[in-house]
Image (cartoon, grey):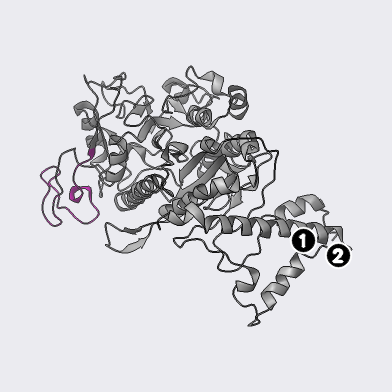
């Protein structure tokens, strides 16, 4: 069998994804390309942070319409099955475990909505229009009871809700969905394909994400060290992949960053000099082999970049970033690290170091999962939403004071997820669907409001016809392209570049949503 040939440069690009660092080093590299620099002022720093909720978050239990008409259909639909997932009405106090709820007539148990109390009321600054099919004079809203920190951010005006977002290339009506219109997204209910679609606009196999595409446009503003333009403490992410910019993957840790040299690394083979010897060997460019020399060059740049960022985040304002708080599981009482807060701690440390690194624009990717709640939704989603709320509140308070500076106005954080979930329950969970709701947080956000149209709730039954739902699947009325374009406009991406990044943006009457 003849070995298949492989392009040497392509192999080097693959090899550049690996780093050789001491075991104690907090950061690891996936090599990124450098680009041309242009002047920028220190006050011009901006970052966007994507929080991806993997698995498909059930937005219908995250942001709820609580007017009587909407709530009646919500509660009747979800208060069913052997483990009902309907939340309790706003204003209801928690029923002690072991006692009977006056709302449902069921005994409250650990992990059932009766024991959590009612949804948390929020009042949008702008009254929502009443959509067709909803019988209300004023629409009211609430958040899941585990989202108290999010409610606080909403009430303080630094967090907004974006309603009924989904993968759309142009507006779609219920009739077009029913007729299986070619305008429907491909592989609509597939996790992998819709994760790819949300991050890049294309199904699985895409190579460039819209975060990376924005970084391609703006990375020249980073006067030095533009290798650190697109960063993920959550592993490689399609969202950050650009044509020029390549993502830099770092390790999330609750511990503060420290500088680790080759000689300080863990002993190799019980030898005090083995680690430094290996370090010298992999950076040796004296070989007669072009491949070996190129690979050594890649590794040298990788190690050098790691040393640069480790040094930057172990001194100066980065040292003022508090450690991510532990999280108390509401069902077990166990204290545990919050993986989202840990990732956001690392993001905050790098943002704090940005001025010393010469950075003016950065794109970050963090994640939380899994929200794929086909069963056990009451405990699984609620626990994850608690982690989300704690992580966002920690990040907001941390950015409020980094070395004495309030950076909240320079950083916009937003949630994403591949799809929402069915409005109906399968007994103790939900299945894959389409439209869902999301949060945007930051000092520049026009918070305390809901953007986009919150839909009519309820499945078709008798004389009731819901124009926003097919079966139990919510048809989105806001596109992820509009969502991304709003973020990109604030970030500094111009209209012509946005049209390239989101080629279907012109299909929507409002290309941006107004939350920034």
Dominant SS in magenta: loop
Callout 1: helix, strand or loop?
Answer: helix
Q: Residues within 10 Å of mark 2 (few under 14, many from 20)?
A: few
Of residues 224 and 478, the one nearer the viewer is 224
Callout 2: helix, strand or loop?
Answer: loop
Question: Any magenta on residue 320?
Answer: no
**Numbered disc total:** 2
* Residue 458 sits in quarter: top left
Question: Any magenta on residue 113?
Answer: yes
> What's the mark number on residue 287?
2
Direction from residue 264 to residue 412 in the image, left or right: left
Highlighted magenta segment, given as a residue range: 95-120
Residue 130 x %, y %:
29, 19
Residue 513 x %, y %:
44, 24
| Mark 1 lies on residue | 296
Q: Quadrant of the N terminus?
A: bottom right
Direction from residue 80 to residue 204 in the image, left or right: right
Q: Residues within 10 Å of mark 1 (few under 14, many from 20)?
A: many
172 relative to 355, above or below: above
């Amino acid at each position: 069998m003849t070995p298949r040939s492989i392009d040497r440069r392509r192999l080097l690009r693959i090899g550049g994804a690996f780093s050789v660092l001491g075991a104690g080093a907090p950061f690891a590299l996936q090599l990124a390309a450098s680009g041309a620099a242009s002047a920028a002022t220190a006050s011009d720093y901006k970052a966007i942070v994507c929080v991806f909720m993997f698995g498909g978050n059930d937005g219908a239990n995250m942001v709820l319409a609580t007017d009587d008409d909407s709530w009646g259909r919500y509660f009747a639909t979800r208060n069913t099955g052997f483990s009902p997932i309907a939340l309790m009405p706003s204003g209801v106090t928690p029923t002690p475990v072991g006692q009977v709820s006056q709302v449902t007539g069921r005994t409250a148990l650990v992990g059932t909505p009766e024991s959590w109390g009612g949804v948390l009321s929020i009042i949008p600054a702008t009254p929502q229009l009443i959509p067709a099919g909803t019988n209300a004079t004023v629409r009211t809203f609430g958040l899941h009871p585990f989202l108290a920190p999010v409610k606080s951010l909403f009430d303080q005006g630094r967090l907004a809700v974006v309603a009924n977002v989904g993968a759309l290339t142009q507006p779609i009506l219920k009739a077009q969905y029913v007729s299986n219109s070619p305008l429907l997204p491909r592989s609509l209910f597939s996790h992998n394909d819709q994760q790819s679609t949300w991050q890049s606009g294309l199904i699985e196999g895409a190579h460039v994400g819209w975060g990376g595409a924005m970084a391609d446009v703006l990375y020249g503003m980073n006067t030095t060290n533009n290798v650190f333009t697109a960063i993920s403490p959550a592993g490689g992410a399609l969202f950050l992949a650009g044509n020029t910019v390549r993502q830099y993957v770092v390790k999330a840790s609750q511990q503060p960053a420290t500088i680790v040299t080759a000689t300080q690394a863990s002993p190799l083979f019980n030898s005090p000099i083995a680690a430094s010897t290996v370090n010298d060997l992999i950076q040796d460019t004296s070989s007669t082999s072009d491949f070996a020399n190129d690979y050594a060059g890649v590794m040298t740049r990788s190690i050098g970049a790691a040393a640069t960022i480790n040094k930057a985040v172990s001194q100066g304002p980065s040292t003022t970033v508090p450690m991510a708080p532990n999280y108390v599981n509401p069902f077990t009482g166990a204290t545990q690290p919050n993986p989202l807060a840990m990732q956001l701690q690392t993001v905050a440390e790098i943002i704090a170091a940005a001025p010393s690194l010469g950075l003016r624009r950065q794109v970050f990717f963090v994640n939380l999962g899994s929200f794929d709640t086909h069963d056990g939704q009451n405990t699984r989603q609620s626990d994850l939403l608690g982690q989300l709320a704690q992580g966002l509140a920690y990040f907001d308070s941390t950015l409020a004071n980094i070395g004495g500076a309030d950076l909240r106005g320079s950083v916009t954080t937003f949630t994403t997820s591949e799809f929402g979930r069915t409005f109906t329950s399968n007994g103790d969970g939900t299945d894959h669907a389409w439209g869902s709701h999301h949060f945007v947080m930051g000092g520049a956000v026009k918070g305390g409001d809901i953007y986009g149209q919150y839909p009519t709730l309820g499945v078709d039954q008798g004389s009731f016809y819901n124009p926003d739902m097919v079966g139990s699947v919510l048809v989105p009325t806001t596109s992820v392209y509009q969502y991304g374009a709003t973020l990109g406009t604030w970030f500094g991406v111009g209209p012509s570049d946005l049209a390239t990044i989101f080629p279907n943006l012109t299909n929507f009457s409002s290309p941006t949503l107004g939350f920034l």
